[in-house]
Image: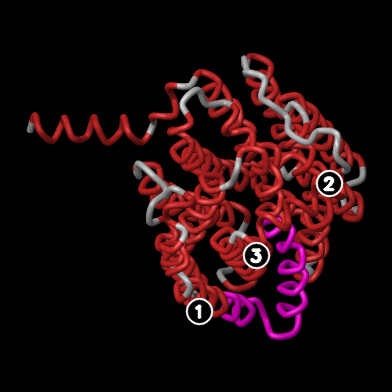
Amino acid sequence: MQYLIYRLKCFFANIFRAFKNRNYRLFFFGHGVSLIGTWMQQVALSWYVYRITGSSFLLGFTGFMGYLPSFFLTPVSGVLADRFDRRKLLLLTQTCAMIQAFSLTYAVYKYNGEVWRAILLAFTLGVINSYDAPIRQAFVADMLDNKEDLSNAIALNSAIFNSARLIGPAVAGLTVNWFGETPCFLLNALSYVAVITSLLLMKIKPREIINKNSGVIANIKEGFKYAREFTPVWMIIKLVGTVSFMAISYNILMPVFVRDILKGSADMLGYLMGAVGLGALAGISYIASRKSAAGLERVAARNAGVLGIGLILFSVSRSFTLSLLFMFITGIGMVSCMASCNTLLQTLSDDDKRGRVMSIYTMALIGMAPFGSLTAGFLSNHIGAPATLFICGFCCLAAARKFNSGLAVFKEHAVLIKI
C-alpha cells in the first residue's frame, strides 16, 4: 500500500511539474476561467443560430466566418510573436476579445433574431483569435524558468482547455434551457477578467529579439521555408491541417444531431460536448505524464485514427447513451493527436522561429476549419449530417494511415531534433 501511495505521488508530481513555475500557475488558472466562458459562448452561439434559422448551412457558415481570418492573418501574428513582447500582445488580444463578448451580449439581447449581427461578431472574434492563438502558443516557453517543463506545460494547457470543454458546454446547455443564450455571452465577457489579471501579475524575463528590423514579408517567408524544409515539422502540420478540415465539422453539426436525430434540447448538446471534454481529459492525462516528446509522433498517428473511428461510430448512432460514449472516444482521439503535434512542434522549433512555426500550426488547425465547416454545412444540406460526419471520420482514418507510413523520418532526425 505504501508503495502504491508513493507511485501515485510520483505520478501526480510528474503530471503537474510545470506548476513549479509561478508565471505558468497564474496563466493556467486565469486562462482556465476564461476558457469556460469561451466554451459557453461557442455552444450558445451555435444553438442560437440554429434555433433562429433552422439551417445547417448557416451553422457551417457561422463557423466559416469565425475561423476564416486565421487562414490569412496568423502568419503575421507569428512574426509579431517573434519580434515583440508576447505578454503585452496577449493583454491587447484578450481585452479585445472581452469587448467582443460584451458586444455579442448586447446584440443578441437588443436585436434577438437578427442572426447576421451574431455572425459578424463571430468573424470579429475570429480576427482577434488569429492574432491571439499563435502568440499564446509561443508564450508558453516564456513563462517557464525550467525549459525542461515545456512539454508538460503544453500538455497541461490542453488539459485546462478540455476541462473547460467539459464544464462550459454543460453549464451553457442548462443556462440556455433556463434563461436563453444571452447570459452565456455575458458570463464569457466577465471571464476575461481572470486571464487579464493573471497576465498583469506575471514577471517575465526579457528575451533576446533576433532580426527585429527585417521586413514582415521576409520574416513570414523565412518561417514557411524553415517549416517546409524541416520534414518532421511539415508532416505534423499536414496532419493537423487534414484532421482540422475533416474533424472540426462535428462541432458545427452537433445542434443538427441533437435536435433532428437524437430529438433532444440544449441540455443534451451540453452533455455531448461535455463528453468530448471528458474524453479529452482522459487522453491528455497520458500526454502530461510523459517525461519527453520522444515517441509522440506514434501517439499522434494512433489517435488520429481513434478520432476517425469515434466520428464514424457517432454518425451511425441513434442512441443518446451510445452517442455519449462515441463523443468520449472522439475527445480522446482529437486532443491526444493535437496535443502530441503541438508538443512536438514546440519542442523541435528554434526559439527565434517558434512564433512563426506556431502560427503555421494555428493556420493548419484553425485556418482550415472554416473551409471544413462550410463544406460540412453544404454536404449536410444535401446528403444529411450523418453521412457527412461518416465521410469526415473515414478521411481522418486515411490521414492517420498516411502519417504513420512516414514515421521513419522522425528516427532519421532524432539526434538533430533531440527527441
**Marks 2 and 1 close (CB-CB < 8 Å):** no
- Relative vertical location of residue 34 with respect to residue 134 in this rendering, above or below: above
Question: SS of the residue at dot 1?
Answer: helix
Q: Main secondary structure of the magenta part?
A: helix
**Marks 1 and 3 close (CB-CB < 8 Å):** no
Which residue is at 48% across, 63% downward? 330
Q: Which residue is mark 2?
A: 127
How many residues crowd around disc 2 within 10 Å: few (fewer than 14), some, or many (20 or more)?
many
The answer to whether residue 160 is visible is yes
- Left/right placement of residue 7 relative to residue 159 reads left
First in sequence: mark 2 vs mark 3 = 2
Q: Nearer the viewer, mark 2 or mark 1?
A: 2
- Left/right placement of residue 131 relative to residue 228 reads right
Magenta span covers which residues?
364-392
Q: Nearer the viewer, residue 31 or 219?
A: 219
Kind of residue at disc 1:
Val
Q: Nearer the viewer, residue 252 or 223?
A: 223
Question: SS of the residue at dot 3?
Answer: helix
Q: Nearer the viewer, residue 264 or 397?
A: 397
x and y percentages locating residue 158 in the rendered image? 52, 44
- Relative vertical location of residue 197 with respect to residue 371 in this rendering, above or below: above
Q: Which residue is mark 1?
A: 316
| Image quadrant assignment for residue 77 | top right
First in sequence: mark 1 vs mark 3 = 3
Q: Which residue is mark 3?
A: 241
Which residue is at 64% across, 44% downward? 39
Which residue is at 71% across, 49% downward? 359
Kind of residue at disc 3:
Gly
